[in-house]
Amino acid sequence: MLELQHISFEVPENDVSHEILRDVSLTVPDGRLVVITGPNGGGKSTLARLIMGIERPTSGTISFNGQDITNLSITERARLGISFALQQPVRFKGLQVLDLLRLASGRDITPSDACEYLSAVGLCARDYINREVNASLSGGELKRIEIATVLARGTALSIFDEPEAGIDLWSFQNLIEVFQGMRENIRDSAIVIISHQERILNIADEIVVLRDGELAMQGPRDEILPRLTGTASALQSCRRIS
Amino acid sequence: MKLDSIQKQLLAEIADLHSIPEGAYNIRSNSQSVGRVSTANIEITSKTDVSGMDIRIKPGTKRQSVHIPVVLTESGLSEVVYNDFFIGEDCDVVIIAGCGIDNCGKADSEHDGIHRFWVGKNSKVKYVEKHYGSGDGEGKRILNPGTEVYLDENSTMEMEMAQIKGVDDTDRKTIAELAAGAKLVVRERLMTHGSQRALSAYDVRLNGAGASADVVSRSVARDNSYQRFDAKIVGNAPCNGHTECDSIIMDNGRILAVPGLEANDVDAALVHEAAIGKIAGEQLTKLMTLGLTEQEAEEQIINGFLK
């Protein structure tokens, strides 16, 4: 179980402190798939990075399975069982897909084990395990490999930051199936997905709406989703631009 | 052939040799040939005017290998060795060279290997050369290899050069001349640490129509080490040339990459790429989210980069 209490996050901008998140409190119980949504710039990705420890909150506490992890490093959080699929996957010259999956799983997995994770994200494993994780891979391929590294870790909490970004329409259905599969085997673990996609919102147990750095709505999907579709967040951001 | 444990370890490092190699070989230890075998197709003879060997490979020799590793374990030894390879037409061979120096003494140890290759028409050569240094003496471990490659029509040479650890000072010069349809592929991997210095210069001349060269260096400069990479390709005919220098700097490491392209034919297509930078923070972050410490992440990134 993940608990965020009164999380605020500020960054200095031209000598003025700019507030990205304001007093966000949130609980993600085990056995749940929680989707965090809301307008661009609302603080969703920042929240995910705070949970992983890539950024540290200005105030507030984060606890995981009862342990205060607010001051723990990325490595320590990862070892406690938190995984994170980056919105923009990183390229590594020389490191092969199999190497990355081995590092992710923490053991010397066989190519056939690696194939399972790659097949799950819709990649034909034989073509990929020996490929370098470099610029020769397309954005969509990298994104799916990124998701496969989280599957290979199989931790108690998996966070996906906009997994749909950069994935083509044909692979998108496959992606939904990956998350549905994870949802079915969730047991003592939890999944947090940051997404704008209605089809991902559709498979959520709970939906959290972040807007302008504040928690605007939170509750079961059936309660929140009708309030979102075709209204609220999308329209508001349009108005802001105009 | 008698080798002590340090010599055996050096042989394993530079040539993956754990026992007597198959095929033709010459093992040189502290300026002496300690083992040599010629085969029906590959003849190794000593030079009479200078230190070194002539290696003659008969035309049509396929799937055969030559090992010519060198080890130095006596502090203060300094030698220049000339090895000439005459490779006939229509061959397909692997040549494994390499030099390991263990210096526990106060005097510098130096091995300058001058390798020249004449590759016959339609032949294919793979050349592997590893350099390695060990020992904790004050004496420097110095390697200054000189390589000359002459590729006849439609021949191919693939060179893999690696120097990952322990060599204090290197000044490497490689020149190549390619006839029509010939192809040269170079993959150089280099890591320097401490206060080491490594210079590597290429001068590749594409003289015949359809010749091509691909010279790629990947290097890591750590601590206070210095590297200089000069890659010059001259296109004298319709040809394709590509050089690439891709480097990671760490600590107080310094790297100078000097591109050089000269086109003397309107159909010469020459490309140079160079990139130097530290390990990207996001690469470290990604591997840390997989549970690695920052140091472990750094090692994995470097190992992959130099693989």
Image (cartoon, coloured by chain):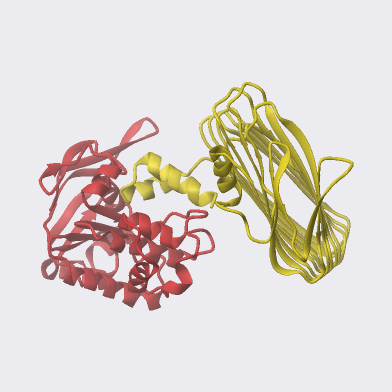
Q: Position of residue B170 (x, y in %)?
A: 69, 36
- For the point 79% across and 72% down, the residue is B60
Q: Colour of chain A?
A: red
- Provide residue B242's location: percent of width, then percent of height: 72, 57
Q: Nearer the viewer, residue A156 or A88?
A: A156
Q: Is residue A107 above or below residue B166?
A: below
User: In the image, B6: left or right of A227?
Assistant: right
Give the side of residue A28 with respect to residue A181, left or right.
left
Is residue B48 found left or right of A25 in the rendered image?
Answer: right
Rendering quarter of residue A180 = bottom left
Q: Is residue B184 above or below residue B108?
A: below
Colour yellow belongs to chain: B
Residue B243's spot in the image, x, y percent? 70, 53
Residue A47 can be seen in this image: yes
* In the foreground, A164 or B93: B93
The answer to whether residue A213 of the structure is visible from this angle is no
Residue that appears at 13% across and 65% down: A187
Q: Is B141 situated left or right of A84 in this image?
A: right
Depth check: give the residue in front, B9 or B224.
Answer: B9
Give above or below for A206 relative to B262.
Answer: below
